[in-house]
């Protein structure tokens, strides 16, 4: 059994546990994912290692505990795993595919497979579209299934940044460490910090490109080779993602970086702009008066065209070339500008951290303030708080505050009900330090109704921030219908900030809307929606969205002092 086969098996377990076990024990899921990743990236052959050194070699593997080591041993000896067979009985593989459809849980998956007898997702889609299954599913269920399949199709083959980044970092490190490599970087959509990534692009410089290519295609995580040339190669990583590598001489690196960072739209616009100066841009350099100019750095490329350096996140052809020409590009916000997190859930609602843990952890991060914004009563499933709970929680916050320098803001994430009212009384809200208001149910309202609903929250003087404003969840749920210009205008007028949720499958508000909202004078809060101490580090993904939305430090309310935040001096 190869390392890749073992990694695949462990990943399969993680996938099934993610459905059956995630609420009970998320760490088990993470443990299997980590073990799979580590083994997928290993250079030594595990089977050889095991036969030379025995069980001890398995126990010593990074990220592998006793129970997983035992399973690997069973796999190596018998090529089978009883545990996985048991899991599959609980959720047979055929059903597991249906579980990939957003909104489909184990029970529905079994119903689709056993009662409706769909062969696969394609078959399910065709038959539902033809009107089959009216005796088995309710109309609403059939509509939801079709919508789920549609949303899924849009994401198919694309990874979230959080999934792509560790792979890219590992592969880039391997290429960088080869002795023939001078420099190597990942480029493409991942360098532009796009929310989802199609394939990974890596570039390098070397005097001996062929040697790098030959080593690259033999790296342990390579599942199979698509192309292998003198200076270029494409492979498929064992996790299914395609990786393109291209190598050029050192003096062309600036142009190569620029070209492969994209976007396609930015490159086309740049070439058109260069033509107005009778210059022609390619991945090798810029031709001017029949001479090819080469560039070691990207800055050199842009400056040669009379442009300021353009940050990768801005390269989407949304006005960046014009701004670079006029020296009006924004000075983009960075992670170190953030002074606190304004959307955090404690174990008073559905979070997994005590208030003490939140204080200790965020203080260590160097934050000046953190808002404890638990769910409110309307959200039954999330153990939401009512007015009395908030009074009780305040006592706990006061107690913890005594031992900490970081300011604990007493906050809530209040529900915006279907009729626009909030599920906590204004009198109570006015006593809190900060109020985040979010839509958590009744997503499918008419555009006018949804707009009026959110507007009434914006116009409530107690509301400071609208949480995850569009409601979309990448690969699962589309944004609800809202009249954005009206929302932006009201936010600017009332100094209500819009949230940029850093949670990797939310990244909501979306980058292109952030850019428009900024033009309308809206301010933003970049928050993680942390439920666990691990989540605070997600802030960087929110920063990425903000940068793609052209935001500077002063556009974001959690970059200022505590008193500016409380007194709305932004
Ligand atoms: P992805 O992979 O779908 O997430 O998006 P990208 O932007 O990484 O696109 P990809 O991998 O197809 O190509 C990487 C970069 O190479 C792209 O951002 C710009 C450049 N590029 C690719 N094809 C073309 C092209 O036809 N014309 C121009 N000007 N540039 C291209
Ligand atoms: Ca790409
Ligand atoms: Ca590519
Ligand atoms: Zn939340």
Image: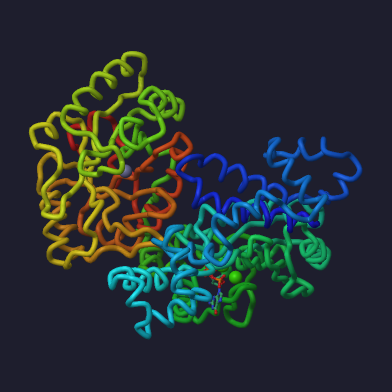
The residue nearer to you, when weighing 149 against 293, is: 149
Residue at the image point whose x is 28% and y is 20% from the top: 396
Horizontally, residue 253 falls left or right of residue 90, namely right
The residue nearer to you, when weighing 455 against 155, is: 155
Q: Position of residue 308 (x, y in %)?
A: 45, 60
Quarter of the image with the C terminus is top left
Horizontally, residue 109 falls left or right of residue 329, namely right
Q: Is residue 157 above or below residue 69?
A: below
Residue at the image point whose x is 34% and y is 73% from the top: 142
Q: Position of residue 526 (x, y in %)?
A: 34, 45
Quarter of the image with the N terminus is bottom right
The residue nearer to you, when weighing 533 against 6, is: 6
Tally the numbered discs.
0
Q: Is residue 249 above or below residue 352?
A: below
Residue at the image point whose x is 60% and y is 67% from the top: 255
The residue nearer to you, when weighing 284 against 209, is: 209
Q: Is residue 300 above or below residue 538?
A: below
Name the residue furthest right.
52
Q: Position of residue 275 (x, y in %)?
A: 48, 81
The reply to whether residue 310 is visible in this rendering is no
Give the image quadrant in which the ligand numbered 3 is located: bottom right
The reply to whether residue 481 is visible in this rendering is yes
Residue at the image point whose x is 34% and y is 52% from the top: 551
Q: Position of residue 206 (x, y in %)?
A: 76, 61
Chosen colour scheme: rainbow
Horizontally, residue 415 falls left or right of residue 239, namely left
Name the residue furthest left.
427
């Amino acid at each position: 059994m190869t390392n890749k086969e073992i990694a695949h098996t462990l990943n399969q377990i993680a996938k099934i546990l993610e459905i059956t076990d995630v609420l009970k024990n998320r760490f088990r899921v993470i443990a299997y994912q980590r073990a799979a990743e580590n083994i997928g990236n290993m250079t030594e052959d595990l089977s050889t290692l095991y036969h030379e050194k025995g069980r001890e070699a398995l126990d010593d593997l990074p990220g592998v505990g006793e129970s997983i080591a035992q399973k690997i041993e069973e796999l190596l000896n018998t090529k089978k795993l009883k545990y996985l067979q048991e899991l599959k009985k609980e959720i047979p593989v055929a059903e597991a595919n249906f579980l990939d459809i957003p909104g489909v849980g184990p029970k529905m998956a079994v119903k689709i497979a056993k009662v409706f007898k769909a062969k696969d997702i394609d078959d399910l889609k065709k038959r539902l579209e033809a009107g089959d299954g009216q005796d088995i599913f309710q109309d609403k269920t059939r509509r939801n299934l079709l919508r789920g399949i549609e949303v899924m199709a849009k994401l198919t083959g694309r990874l979230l940044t959080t999934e792509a980044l560790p792979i890219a970092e590992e592969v880039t490190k391997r290429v960088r460490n080869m002795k023939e490599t001078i420099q190597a970087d990942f480029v493409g959509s991942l360098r532009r910090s796009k929310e989802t990534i199609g394939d990974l692009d890596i570039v390098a410089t070397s005097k001996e490109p062929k040697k790098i290519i030959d080593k690259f295609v033999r790296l342990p995580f390579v599942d199979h080779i698509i192309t292998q040339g003198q200076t270029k190669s494409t492979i498929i990583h064992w996790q299914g993602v395609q990786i393109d590598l291209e190598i050029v001489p050192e003096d062309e690196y600036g142009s190569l970086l620029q070209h492969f960072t994209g976007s396609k739209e930015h490159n086309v616009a740049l070439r058109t702009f260069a033509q107005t100066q009778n210059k022609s841009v390619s991945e090798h350099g810029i031709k001017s008066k029949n001479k090819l100019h080469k560039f070691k750095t990207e800055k050199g490329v842009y400056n040669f065209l009379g442009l300021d350096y353009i940050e990768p996140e801005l390269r989407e052809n949304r006005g960046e070339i014009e701004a670079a020409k006029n020296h009006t590009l924004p000075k983009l916000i960075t992670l170190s500008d953030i002074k606190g997190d304004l959307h955090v859930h404690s174990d008073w609602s559905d979070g997994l951290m005590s208030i003490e843990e939140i204080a200790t952890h965020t203080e260590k991060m160097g934050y000046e303030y953190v808002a404890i914004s638990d769910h409110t009563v309307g959200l039954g499933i999330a153990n939401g708080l009512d007015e009395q709970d908030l009074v009780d929680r305040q006592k706990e916050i006061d107690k913890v505050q005594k031992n900490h320098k970081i300011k604990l803001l007493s906050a809530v994430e209040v529900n915006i009900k279907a009729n626009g009212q909030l599920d906590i009384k204004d009198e109570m809200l006015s006593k809190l330090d900060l109020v985040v208001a979010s839509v958590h149910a009744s997503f499918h309202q008419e555009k006018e109704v949804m707009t009026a609903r959110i507007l009434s929250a914006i116009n409530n003087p107690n509301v400071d921030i609208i949480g995850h404003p569009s409601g979309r969840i990448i690969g699962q749920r589309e944004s609800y219908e809202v009249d954005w210009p009206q929302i932006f205008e009201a936010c600017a007028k009332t100094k209500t900030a819009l949230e940029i949720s850093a949670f990797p499958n939310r990244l909501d508000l979306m980058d292109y809307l952030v850019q428009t909202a900024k033009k309308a004078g809206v301010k933003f809060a970049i928050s993680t929606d942390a439920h666990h101490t691990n989540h605070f580090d997600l802030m960087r993904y929110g920063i990425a969205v903000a940068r793609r939305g052209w935001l500077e430090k002063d556009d974001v309310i959690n970059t200022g002092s505590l008193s500016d935040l409380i007194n709305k001096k932004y």
